Amino acid sequence: MSHYARSKFESEKVVQQAEIDSAILRTIIIYGVVDDKQRSNVVIWTINSLRQQKNINVISDQMRSPTLAEDLADACLQAALKRATGIYHVSGSETMSILEMVNRTADFFQLDKKYIHPITTAQLNQPAKRPLLTGFNIDKAKRELNFQPHTLQQGLEIVKSQLEN
């Protein structure tokens, strides 16, 4: 287990052992617009980099379920309003490679994909090891929190409208 994973696990244990009702919402690869519109997530990084015609190395063998920030915020709000307890997995419902996410973002925003260069996890040589597949079963969040995540396509439409404002 990596240091990052261990710290998350230990943090969850502290919350669970506290003598308070609590909900833990786990998520994956959050994307959306932030105030400064800088590299804060894969979608914004992709848009900014390709608009500036920068070459980007994108991991082709890691699978994730992209989560729109608004979906995560809604799940947190619902958990609070419903006084939910326990662990909830909150992510997008589609699982794809990071490369596919970047390519779909480029296509949506009609950006030149010639600057996208696929690489493997091994080639990236990240100091913190990451699993190749990270996905969740979000059925509990759907059932108990009425969680209805947007597809990546729908999320990109939201991002586009926010960037235009």
Image: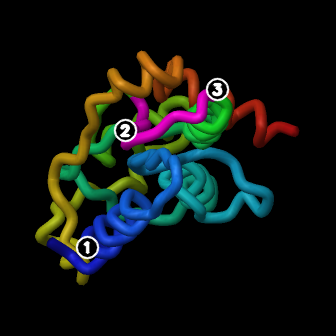
Closer to the eye: label 1 or 3: 1
Q: Quadrant of residue 17?
A: bottom left
Q: Which mark is residue 6?
A: 1
Q: Could you tell me which quadrant the N terminus lies in?
A: bottom left
Could you tell me how far apart the alpha carbons at marks 1 and 2 are, in whole angstroms? 18 Å
Crowding at dot 3, Cα within 10 Å, few <14 / some 14-19 / many 20+, comes out as some
18 above or below 139?
A: below
The residue at which mark 3 appears reads as 157
Asked whether 75 falls inside the magenta stretch, the response is no
Say which amino acid is labelled 3. Answer: Glu
- Can you see residue 71? no
Locate residue 10, reporting x and y percent: 31, 71
Say which amino acid is labelled 2. Answer: His
In this view, the residue in front, 128 or 107, is 128
154 above or below 110?
A: above
SS of the residue under disc 1: helix
- What segment is highlighted magenta in the picture? 82-92
Of the numbered discs 1 and 2, the one sitting upstream in the chain is 1
Of the numbered discs 1 and 3, the one sitting upstream in the chain is 1
The residue at which mark 2 appears reads as 89
Closer to the eye: label 3 or 2: 2
Check whether the beta carbons of the residues at disc 1 and disc 3 lie within 8 A of each other: no
Say which amino acid is labelled 1. Answer: Arg
Of the numbered discs 3 and 2, the one sitting upstream in the chain is 2
Residue 60 shown left or right of residue 139 in the figure: left
Locate residue 118, reporting x and y percent: 25, 55
